[in-house]
Image: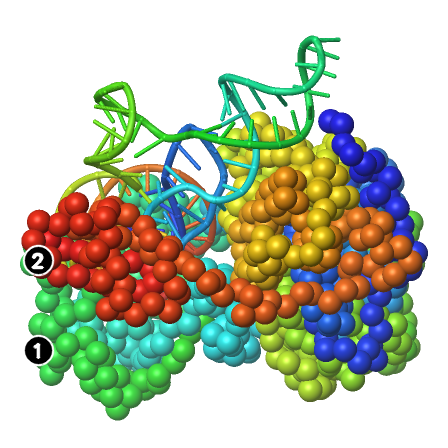
Amino acid sequence: MARPFSVTDVERKWQARWLDEGTYEVDNDDPRERYYALCMYPYPSGTAHQGHVRNYTFGDLVTRYQTMRGKAVLSPFGFDSFGLPAENAAIKANSHPRIFTERRMEELKSSVRRLGAVYDWRREVYSHHPDYIRYAQTIFLKFYEAGLAYRAEAPVNWCPGCQTVLANEQVLGDGTCERSGDLVVRRNLEQWFYRITDYADELLHDVDTLQWPERVKTMQRNWIGRSEGVEFDLPFADGSKNALRVFTTRPDTGFGVTYAVVAPEHPLLDALTTEEQRAAVRELVERAARSSDIERSATLEAGGALDKRGAFTGSYVVNPFTSAEVPVYVADYVLATYGTGAIMAVPAEDERDWAFAEVHGLPIVRTVETPEGHEGPYAGEGAHINSGFLDGLETAAAKERAIEFLVERAGGVRTVNYRLRDWLISRQRFWGCPIPVVYCPNDGIVPVPYDQLPVLAPDDVTLESSGQSPLATHEGFRRVSCPTCGGEAVREADTMDTFTDSSWYFLRYADPFSEGRPFDPDQVRPWMPVDQYIGGIEHAILHLLYARFYMKALVDVGLAPGLPREPFTRLFTQGMIRMDGTKMSKSKGNLIAPEKYYDTVGADGLRLFHLFVGPPADDVDWTDKSEELIEGCGRYLDRVWRLCGGEDVTFHEGETEADVEVWREAHRTIARVTEDLEAWSYNTAVAAIMEYTNTLSRWARSPEGAARSTFTRATDVLLQLLAPMTPHVCAELWEQRYPGEKSVHETTWPVADPELVARERVVMVLQVNGKVRGRVEVAPDIGAQEAEDVALNHPDVVKFLTGEPRRVVAVPPRLVNIIL
RNA sequence: GCCCAGAUGGCGAAAUGGCAGACGCGGAAGACUCAAAAUCUUCUACUCGAGAGGGUGUGUGGGUUCGAGUCCCACUCUGGGCACCA
């Protein structure tokens, strides 16, 4: 493709200049209004792909636009550089993860520079830097001191492929590992947890305050999963003092309880099991322990195996509502980790209980009137029946009465339960931040003293997928003297989930040189919260929830006094790039490298494509057509080049009416583009600029031509509006025009003059019976009566009139609709 | 199963309840050229009509309204999230 200028030369020149001159470096004492623009912490996976290009194009647009708006924009870059892929690659190549990681960091760094994205590189942060590790460990210890980090044995998700434990959030709905795709199994292990559940309520409430996409907020709410109910006792029928404590959200259906169920791991199961039932119960418990959650649910879907999923314990408890004795079952459809690990079963009003009751021949008693023709379980609302003192009450009222009853008679307590579990942060892997604790036979868990941080992993470690942490096999690392008593002790060999690293990096960016603490709150305060956070929808739950938790916890443990409790004010989630219906990704091998476009349309052309192709939040389908669109974007920039260079332009002296109108159009475009950029409607912003370019072209190349002063002003505006989108070509054209003066990127974003934006004449549409029959130019402030008169006397309308119209609807100055 | 988002020309898309298809891609014709590329100009939803002009049209079926791509109800399809959470 022949172009009127050398794209490569121009782009290289400006990229070097932005880097060398530190154009986008900002200091913490900058007097301007602060703005924090941030793209999500990238994992260094090598050279950029189209997803990166899209992400960093948006981020760079925000940075450059807000800078032109006169703000001090913090635009940092760094790497989420710990993680499994590098470790696995190192095992395969018998090398060290650092080597892979740092090579790929360099690749991605040069990729984003080649795209023309600008950052304050002095602030670069990456997770495996010893300083970052030191302060990540500082945070862990502060959390530990505050009781937010604790060690516990728990049934955990073990991924055989990754040879490590996973967080609940990393297990997909089908029970497989989000990374390796292996079926996750369950193990009981001593692990470290963060007490994120302490913050469940705050995390839920604060969602309302965020300017985030509604669907991300919904996903967060659902993940936290708050449910209000009541806990109460079902006394043992044998008269012993014991009682089975259950949780329910539907106390109003208590008269329909026909049995109770405990989880296979329930502590009272043994006591409940009679001799005759012991064998059956043991078989059920063992089977449940062996199987994962997924296999448990699979049996439900299969339908047929329900009888194997539960067993009668031989014991009975008393339903406090009816005083009836009901059997206690053990079944794997009840989870030990939710509520009290035991439930009252109401088959008529719960789908799962219904299915179980049918298989085991248990009675089903309806307590809520079903809608006309309804069969099967009914979990909806309605009037109560067969419910003694609740009869006739609607659901809400019945709930209240039932709770009062339970509080009075059955040890009832109103309770809130969350789906959210504590965050398991232990990972049996090498390439991560070591957990800084020591285990001493005398002193137990001993935190590593702050002045001994960072705890760094040694390099000479054998990396293999053995199921235990590679660090555990390194005697030099493992053996240590106890910081408290000086005796022989062992170090923790696990590392932290890498989501811990991405939970506070944005704070380090704001004060990357801080020593002695993760960051200085006084330095960070003016920048926080992040004004605009940009990333992929795939982080809607995990990363965003963890970072929100960290922010709150950091404030509470005293590391971030006076900082906001929510880190990201506004979030934008960009759409995915898809190819043949699936996500474009390295693992699928369907990447389209951005490099192939740099020599033809340039980074500017590719950026313009990503901005123009569709709404930024929508997915992009990459097809053969995409190539043509990209070339079209390149051709458009050529037109801008020729136009701004004054090619084919006829100049005349003095301003004509056409010149005045062009200047008005300039202001209209400023208004449109500014509004669109604020609203993340980048595709229409580009369209507006293209329209403006076409207008300028037609005008300047017409035989009458353009006044030189108007031409200069009008094309200056064009370059300024385009500058955040296609920064290189605009910088170059501006420099040719104003050599030695400040760059277009340092100019102030133009402001639309409302008087110029307003039109002197507008087109009013004339309809007859809702059909367009004519148009007429009128003044924008035309009154309704005048508009009606104009319409009724217009020749295009008159020929349709058959008499007095039945009605005339005038919406001045847009249209008049005449109903016959 | 539940929740959310979406469905508009050949394609990407645009449209505070008020001219559907802006902007761009692709296509057609023309200008320039020995020729091609590049560039420029015009046309380009479907349909009836020689033409002027008319009719139809935003996934389907209803509704509200002078007027619906937009609001309401029901449905179809596509994408995403959640899914024993009592």
Q: Position of residue A544 (x, y in %)?
A: 59, 64
Q: CA distance from mark 2 to mark 1?
A: 61 Å
Q: Residue at x 79, y 64 (%)?
A: A746
Q: Nearer the viewer, residue A713 or A209?
A: A713
First in sequence: mark 2 vs mark 1: 1
Q: Is residue A80 left or right of residue A391?
A: right
Q: Nearer the viewer, residue A656 or A602?
A: A656
Q: Position of residue A567 (x, y in %)?
A: 64, 73
Residue placed under numbered mark 2 in the picture = A804
Q: Residue at x 80, y 80 (%)?
A: A31
Task: Identify residue type, mark 1.
Answer: Gly
Q: Position of residue A747 (x, y in %)?
A: 77, 64
Q: Height in image: A477 above or below A610?
A: below
Count of numbered circles in the view: 2
Find residue A392 and name its label. 1
Residue A52 seen in the figure: no
Quarter-of-image position of residue A270: bottom left
Q: Residues within 10 Å of mark 2 (few under 14, many from 20)?
A: few
